Image (cartoon, rainbow, N blue to C red):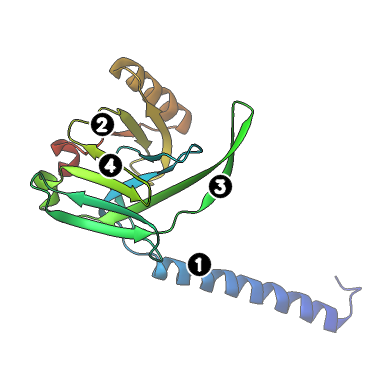
């Protein structure tokens, strides 16, 4: 770069140094702003293109909390067997355009990670999603088997498996784990997390 004038070289190096400092500072600010990982309850679902509310199985996960940013027309509530409220959150749901079997439609979805309280392990009996026109409930009788495949070292979700028999679920988990280069943790739920899920 000896053929470049001194002001150009100076500006070049200054811009590079400034960009490096800004990226390091923003990365450290991001890590400082990220809440710590805690035992939490993954609550997720939405409104399908026909306008019907749905809930996916709830999971106990180790993750930073993610809570609603503003109240809205939708509510997710957890109750014990006697109907006492354990938690309740009001929120808005973003709308997204989806295409399924060549048909376009609008769908609303949400996903929250709610820090748990120890008493919920034995008490949580129902989770209900309410919207102005309908409700849907998961309870201990719900049978929506699902597995989340998770990298235990990074916490990264590697896959979701639904409605598979146990042998196929294990084979799929092994295949995904092999592709990822390590064994994966399998989180299982039929609706309300089982007692074992809370002990992990």
Q: Which badge, 3 or 4, is on the more N-terminal residue? A: 4
Residue behind mark 2: 190
Residue behind mark 1: 27
- Callout 3 secondary element: strand
Q: Position of residue 56 (x, y in %)?
A: 35, 38
Vertical order, 105 against 95 (above or below)? above
Q: Which badge, 2 or 3, is on the more N-terminal residue? A: 3
Residue at (39, 28) in percent of width and height: 161
The quarter of the displayed image where residue 147 is located: top left
Tag shown at residue 59:
4
Residue behind mark 3: 96
- Callout 4 secondary element: strand
Q: Position of residue 133 (x, y in %)?
A: 38, 47
Mark 4–mark 2 contact, CB under 8 Å?
no
Q: Residues within 10 Å of mark 2 (few under 14, many from 20)?
A: many
The C terminus, quarter of image? top left
- Callout 2 secondary element: loop
Left or right: residue 142 versus residue 122 is right
Q: Which badge, 1 or 4, is on the more N-terminal residue? A: 1
Between residues 79 and 38, which one lies in front from this camera angle?
79
Camera-nearest label, 3 or 4:
3
Residue at (37, 19) in percent of width and height: 171
Mark 2–mark 1 contact, CB under 8 Å?
no
């Amino acid at each position: 770069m000896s053929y470049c004038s001194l002001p150009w070289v100076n500006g070049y190096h200054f811009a590079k140094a400034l960009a490096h400092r800004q990226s390091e500072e923003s990365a450290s600010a991001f890590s400082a702003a990220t809440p710590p990982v805690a035992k939490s309850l993954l609550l997720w679902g939405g409104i399908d293109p026909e306008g019907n509310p749905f809930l996916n199985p709830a999971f106990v996960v180790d993750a930073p909390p993610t809570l609603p940013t503003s109240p809205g027309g939708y509510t997710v509530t957890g109750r014990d067997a006697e109907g006492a409220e354990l938690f309740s959150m009001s929120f808005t749901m973003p709308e997204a355009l989806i295409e399924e079997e060549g048909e376009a439609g609008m769908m609303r979805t949400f996903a929250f990670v709610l820090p748990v309280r120890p008493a919920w392990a034995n008490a949580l009996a129902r989770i209900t999603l309410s919207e102005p026109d309908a409700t849907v409930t998961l309870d201990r009788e719900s049978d929506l088997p699902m597995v989340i495949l998770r990298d235990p070292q990074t916490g990264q979700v590697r896959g979701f498996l639904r409605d598979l028999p146990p042998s196929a679920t294990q084979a799929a988990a092994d295949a995904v784990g092999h592709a990822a280069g390590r064994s994966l943790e399998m989180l299982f739920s039929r609706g309300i997390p089982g007692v074992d899920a809370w002990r992990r």
